[in-house]
Amino acid sequence: MSELIELAKEIREAAKRGESLGLSEDELAFYDTLDLTDTSVQALGDDTLKAITRDLVDTVRRNVTIDWTQKESVKANLRRLVKRLLRKYGYPPEKQDKAMVTVLQQAELLCKDWAA
């Protein structure tokens, strides 16, 4: 029972954090995939990181299909789009590959309902 109470508290805290940042639940999930502990990433600033997050969610939503996790061509296209987006916003080059992998992993977890 105490574990359920703790989980409920964590969910409420995450929702409050998303509201304070002005991000939806999905956007917050992608925001958290960015390496926010790294000083070079923090140097981009909160507004830029939020813009990256919104573009990531929009890009992933537009490009997922029903069986996208099974098709290497779709995954390759998403990798290309995510890398391009990170470069556009000046995300640190040495962090881009890790961020791209993490974003795609997050997409696999969250985007099951997004596929058209």
Image: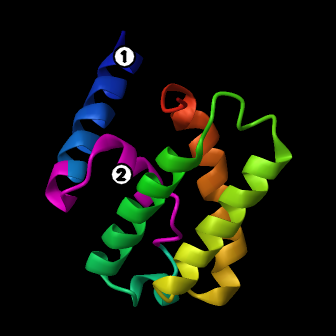
Most foreground residue, 95 or 83: 83
Residue depicted at 29% across the width and 24% down the height? 8
Q: Check the image and report above or below for 50 versus 92.
A: above
Residue 73 image offset from top left, x and y in percent: 81, 50
Query: Considering the numbered disc 2 on the image, is that residue within a helix, a strand or a loop?
Result: helix
x and y percentages locating residue 65 in the rendered image: 62, 35
Q: Relative to residue 73, is residue 38 depicted above or below? A: below
Q: Earlier in the sequence, mark 2 or mark 1?
A: 1
Q: Which residue in the structure is indicated by mark 2?
A: 28
The amino acid beneath tag 1 is Leu
Mark 1 lies on a secondary structure that is helix
Q: Residue at 74% x, 48% y: name it.
A: 74
Q: Characterize the local packing of mark 2: few (<14), some (14-19) or many (20 or more) Cα atoms within 10 angstroms.
A: many
Query: Foreground: 19 or 8?
Result: 19
3D distance between C-alphas at marks 2 and 1: 22 Å
Image coloring type? rainbow
Which span of residues is magenta-colored? Answer: 19-36
Residue 32 inside the magenta-drawn segment: yes
Side (left or right) of 94 relative to 29: right
Q: Residue at x 23, y 51 (%)?
A: 17
Q: Which residue is mark 1?
A: 4
To which quarter of the image does residue 97 belong? bottom right
Pair 2/1: label in front? 2
Q: Residue 16 sits in which quadrant?
A: top left
Amino acid type, mark 2: Leu
Q: Could you tell me residue 40's position as x and y percent?
A: 50, 89
On-image quarter of the N terminus: top left
